[in-house]
Structure formats: C-alpha cells, structure tokens
C-alpha cells in the first residue's frame, strides 16, 4: 500500500471512530459517536451527519477505490441518512448500524486488494473466513 493510501486510511479510521464509536457506554459493550449524537437533533443533525459522512467517500475517490467500493460506501451513507432521519427509529438505527465504521472497513479491504497486500489476513476488521489457509 502506498504511503498516500495508508495516510488516507488512517484519516478515515480516526474519522469513523469519532463519528460512530468515540464514547464508550460504561457497563456495556456499546459505544456512540458524533453521528448518533447529531442524529438526536431533528433535521439539522441528520443533514450534518450526512455531509460529514461524505468525507469517507471523498477519501475513497482520492485513494483510487473502485466504483463498486465507492457505490457500496454511498449506499451505506444514504441508508444511514434516510433511516436515521425517521424520528425515534432513526436514532436507534444510528447507534447500531455504524455506517462510518462499515465504510472504513470497505475502504480498508479495497485498498488491501488494490495493493495486493500479503498481510491482509491480519488487517483489523477483515473477515478472517475470507483469508486463504496457511
């Protein structure tokens, strides 16, 4: 993986954690982020979350992610925005779906495939069942 792509991935990872899991809820395995908190503010919060989530799509484009990966990222962003805008249901959805973390994983997997990385088996977030046996 090129240095530029690795830096982009680090930025996306930091951003997605901030948006989806920055604050752990004591006594549980759950965490919340800025996206879930913004979603509590009707309309403006959901629109702000949508715009901020677009950052991952911009980074994916800059890093050279495939059209398929970018489409999957866009689908997650729109799904999060549409369902997240529904009162009450959307707030719960924002706390559980974590679209930004999903999108960071999509980009990580895509960039690993592009670079032909031999260490993809130990890449965080990668489904271990997809790796070849040793």
Image (tube, helix red, strand yellow):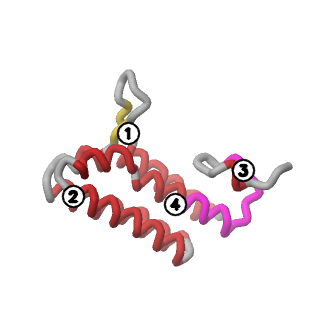
Foreground tag (4 vs 3): 3
The stretch in magenta equals: 106-122
Q: Which residue is mark 4?
A: 8
Going from N to C along the chain, the mark reached first, 1 or 4, is 4
**Element under disc 4:** helix
Image point (40%, 68%), residue name: 75
C-alpha gap between disc 2 and disc 4: 29 Å
**Element under disc 2:** loop
| Most common SS among magenta residues | helix
Foreground tag (1 vs 4): 1
Foreground tag (2 vs 4): 2
18, above or below 6, in the image = above
C-alpha gap between disc 1 and disc 3: 26 Å
Q: Which mark is residue 85?
A: 2
Q: Position of residue 5 (x, y in %)?
A: 58, 63
Query: Which of the 4 image quarters holds residue 30?
Result: top left
C-alpha gap between disc 1 and disc 2: 21 Å
C-alpha gap between disc 1 and disc 4: 19 Å
Do labels 4 and 3 touch, CB within 8 Å?
no
C-alpha gap between disc 4 and disc 3: 20 Å
Residue closer to the observer: 129 or 52: 129
Foreground tag (1 vs 3): 3
125, above or below 71, in the image = above
The residue lying furthest to the bottom in this view is 67
Q: Which residue is mark 1?
A: 22
Q: Position of residue 21 (x, y in %)?
A: 39, 41
Quadrant of the drawing holding the N terminus: bottom right
Q: Which residue is mark 3?
A: 121
Callout 4 environment at 10 Å: few (<14), some (14 to 19), or many (20+)?
Answer: some
């Amino acid at each position: 993986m090129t240095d530029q792509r690795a830096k982009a991935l680090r930025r996306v990872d930091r951003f997605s954690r901030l948006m989806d899991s920055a604050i752990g809820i004591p006594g549980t395995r759950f965490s919340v982020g800025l996206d879930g908190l913004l979603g509590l503010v009707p309309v403006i919060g959901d629109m702000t979350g949508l715009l901020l989530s677009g950052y991952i799509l911009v980074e994916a484009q800059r890093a050279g992610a495939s059209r398929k990966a970018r489409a999957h990222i866009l689908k997650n962003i729109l799904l999060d925005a549409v369902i997240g805008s529904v009162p009450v249901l959307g707030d719960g959805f924002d706390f559980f779906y974590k679209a930004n973390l999903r999108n960071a994983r999509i980009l990580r997997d895509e960039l690993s495939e592009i670079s032909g990385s031999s260490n993809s088996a130990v890449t965080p977030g990668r489904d271990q069942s997809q790796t070849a046996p040793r």
